């Protein structure tokens, strides 16, 4: 079995899978279920100076994604200080306390939360994209001396430069990314938005945002020297492997835990272990930033090569070939004169029977 332990900012994780701030960690009982489900570390639901008034309905599964109007913790901060945080310390795992949003709000919270936190995660979700209020929030959280991880919202034009500035201001790490939005879904039976917010808008998470999250992790990790925690669209062990190859030192999971329950954390760790074993890795730390290290390598593209032993003649490559370069005879066959080397057939094949890289 490969080693799954990771360490950063003075925290030692038994595996790199942890919950993200959200419904699966809404109180200490839920956090306990995450710990028992195999999480390698813990993150608490984001608190602010008052409990959130969450509009309902607030969660909806979509094809390929998830929409929500979730806000910060609906529990008042006093409840966390007096009850919930104390229980979280009993699970013998690193505890990252999430809070937000402005410097003024954080200053009212951070000292009371400090005895329970191994590190802080500062959500910037409602602060906007101007960096100065983010810097102010960071400095407010840094006043206790605990490591501070800044959670990045998607859509920042120069996220690498943005992260470098925050690193210069003292950020000990980053969490990337928050949910994407606002987004809209209409219930066609009623003609109304399903979400209960005043606008009907929600925020997109789940599988649909993984490419967005990966790009942010890749750019941030390539620009800073501090750790990055990847979050967004992780549904299986291979997703976690991909995120760590992009530069993440660990990953967080929320949507998939909502859909499949807290045992998902241990399941993902097990799937990661199997992948590492099958690919000859002895330690998960070997893959962190692997894609960044290979950034300059040239990938030589060839015409698609079909493994006739694996091809099941399903015809998916033929149907989706925009250049009419694929045919069944009776196995998949490539017309080199027509082939554009677009690569779609490689990703459409259900049996991995087609390859395009030399």
Image (cartoon, grey):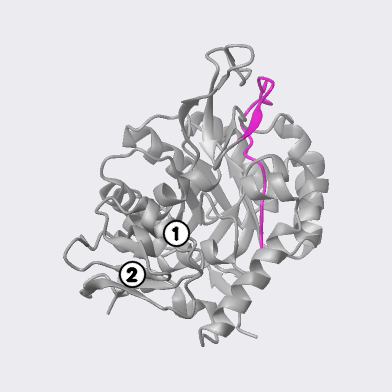
Q: Quadrant of the N terminus?
A: bottom right
Mark with earlier residue (2, 1): 1
Closer-to-camera residue (167/353): 353
Residue at 40 percent of width and 56 percent of height: 217
Up the image or down, 15 lies above or below 235; here it is below
Residue at 62 percent of width and 39 percent of height: 46
Q: How many marks?
A: 2
Up the image or down, 44 lies above or below 217; here it is above
Residue 14 seen in the current view:
no
Horizontally, is 210 left or right of 108 in the view? Answer: left
Q: Main secondary structure of the magenta part?
A: loop
Q: Position of residue 40 (x, y in %)?
A: 67, 65
Closer-to-camera residue (259/111): 259
The residue positioned farthest toward the left in the image shown: 337
Q: Which residue is mark 1?
A: 315
The residue positioned farthest toward the front in the image shown: 329
Instruction: Sort mark 2 into few (<14), some (14-19) or many (20+) by Cα contacts within 10 Å.
Output: some
- Magenta extent: 40-61
Q: Position of residue 169 (x, y in %)?
A: 34, 50
Horizontally, is 260 left or right of 193 in the view? Answer: right
Secondary structure of residue under mark 2: strand
Closer-to-camera residue (176/354): 354
Instruction: Sort mark 1 into few (<14), some (14-19) or many (20+) by Cα contacts within 10 Å.
Output: some
Secondary structure of residue under mark 1: loop
Q: Quadrant of the C terminus?
A: bottom left
Up the image or down, 265 lies above or below 286; here it is above
Quadrant housing residue 224: bottom left
Residue at 62 percent of width and 20 percent of height: 194
Q: Give the alpha-carbon distance from disc 2 to disc 1, as whole Å.
A: 10 Å
Magenta run includes residue 50: yes
């Amino acid at each position: 079995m490969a080693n799954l332990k990771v360490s950063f900012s003075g925290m030692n994780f038994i595996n790199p899978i942890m919950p993200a701030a959200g419904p699966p960690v809404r109180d200490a009982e839920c956090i306990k279920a995450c710990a028992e489900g195999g999480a390698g570390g813990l993150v608490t639901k984001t608190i602010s100076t008052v409990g959130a008034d969450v509009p309902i309905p607030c969660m909806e599964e979509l094809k390929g994604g998830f929409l929500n109007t979730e806000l910060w913790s609906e529990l008042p901060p006093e409840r966390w200080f007096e009850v919930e945080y104390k229980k979280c310390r009993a699970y013998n795992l690193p505890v990252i306390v999430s809070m937000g949003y402005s410097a003024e709000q954080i200053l009212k919270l951070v000292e009371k939360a400090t005895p329970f936190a191994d590190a802080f995660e500062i959500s910037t979700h409602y602060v906007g994209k101007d960096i100065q209020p983010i810097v102010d929030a960071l400095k407010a959280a840094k006043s206790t001396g605990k490591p501070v991880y800044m959670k990045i919202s998607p859509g920042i034009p120069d996220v690498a430069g943005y992260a470098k500035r925050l690193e210069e201001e003292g950020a000990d790490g980053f969490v990337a990314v928050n949910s994407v939005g606002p987004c809209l879904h209409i219930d066609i039976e009623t003609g109304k938005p399903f979400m209960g917010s005043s606008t009907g808008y929600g925020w997109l998470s789940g599988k649909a945002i993984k490419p967005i999250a990966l790009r942010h992790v890749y750019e941030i990790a390539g620009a800073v020297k501090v750790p990055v925690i990847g979050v967004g669209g992780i549904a299986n062990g291979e997703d976690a492997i991909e995120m760590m190859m992009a530069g993440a030192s660990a990953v967080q999971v929320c949507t998939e835990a909502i859909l499949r329950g807290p045992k998902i954390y241990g399941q993902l760790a097990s799937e990661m272990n199997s992948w590492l074993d099958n690919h000859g890795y002895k330690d998960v730390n070997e893959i962190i930033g692997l894609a960044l290290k290979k950034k300059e390598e040239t990938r030589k593209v060839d015409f698609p090569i079909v493994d006739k032993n694996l091809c099941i003649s399903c015809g998916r490559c033929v149907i989706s070939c925009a250049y009419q370069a694929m045919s069944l005879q009776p196995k998949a066959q490539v017309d080199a004169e027509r082939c554009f080397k677009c690569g779609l057939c490689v990703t459409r094949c259900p049996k991995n029977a087609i390859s395009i890289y030399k």
